[in-house]
Amino acid sequence: MKRHVWIPLALVALLFSRSVFFVLDEAEQAILVQFGEPRGDVIVKPGLKVKLPYQDVRRFDKRLLVWDGGVTQIPTLGREFILVDTTARWRIAVPLQFLRSVRDENGARTRLDDIIDSVVRDMISSTELEEIIRSRDWSVNLASLDADSVAGLDDADLRQRPKLGRELLEQEILQRARRLMPELGIELHDVRIKRVTYIDSVRRQVENRMIAERQSIAERFRSEGQGRSQEILGDMERELRRIGSEAQRRAEEIRGEADAEATRIYGQAFGEDPEFYGFFRTLEQYRSLGSNVTLMLRADSDFFRYIERVMPQE
């Protein structure tokens, strides 16, 4: 009989304990709700907790949560239509305000859809495409580029840094969206643009611009190469002229030295035997006349004095 009495009592105690006790996880925070109205402070300390049987427990995550927006087609300031995919991280900062404004995470994501998408659309539509694509610290090291792997903007475009850039654009989106978060009890941690995709017409424009940019860079490299080539050729021609001039000067010096030596030898020979030197020079002149030369000279000319000596007198 006693056993039959204890069983119902145990069941009643179990049901009573489940309606009075609850366990709060470390990653959770909770608010007790009584007849649709919050009661007491936010419960943040994990462990076994007690509540009244007619109270409900609303649990909220304390961790960072992820929001992913849909891919949206937005026109830029230059009227290029792009597809933008955005993501954000947020957490429930004020559970009581969160409960009263959006009630749960699904309601929060719906409000985030409206707020972040609106801010992103406003920012993208008032920004040039280059500012959305490039980073503020974007730069090109021209010395590391070659004509086969680069081609792009002219020098002014290559060295021009974005005024805003992707990072500052995301920060501005975050600051604008944060202004609307306190009334929702949400703390927006960051907002990121995951991906920017061109529609077909914009893709063709970008491709054409990339081709023009590459051609511009290639032309600049060719121009620099031609200038360097002309500089090298000029240096080479100057060096060749210097070498030729030096060689010619040295050759003239050698000729002068040879002529001086020959003159010295002739002078020495003439000084030792003037008669033989005169005879030798006259024979050289005879040899140089050739076989078909006619000379009109006087019979007593010195040119024939050696011939007259060797020819018999008639």
Image (cartoon, grey):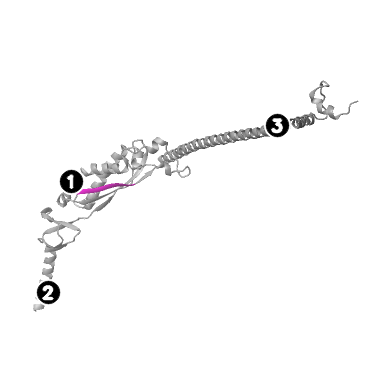
* Residue at the front extreme of this rendering: 272
How far apart marks 1 and 3 lie (CA) works out to 125 Å
- Helix or strand or loop: what does disc 2 sit on? helix
Q: In this view, does 168 lie above or below 40?
A: above
Residue that mark 2 sits on: 7
Q: Which mark is residue 271?
A: 3
- Helix or strand or loop: what does disc 1 sit on? helix
Residue 159 placement (x, y as % from top left): 38, 38
Amino acid bearing label 3: Gly
Q: Which span of residues is magenta-colored?
A: 182-194
Q: Residue at left 52%, top 36%?
A: 235
Residue that mark 1 sits on: 182
**Residue closest to the eye, 33 or 146:** 146
Residue 187 falls within the magenta-colored stretch: yes
Q: Is there a contact, CB below 8 Å, between mark 2 and mark 3?
A: no
**Quadrant position of the C terminus in the picture:** top right
Res 119 visible? yes
**Residue closest to the eye, 200 or 36:** 200
The answer to which quarter of the image holds residue 135 is top left
**Residue closest to the eye, 73 or 255:** 255
Residue 74 placement (x, y as % from top left): 33, 40
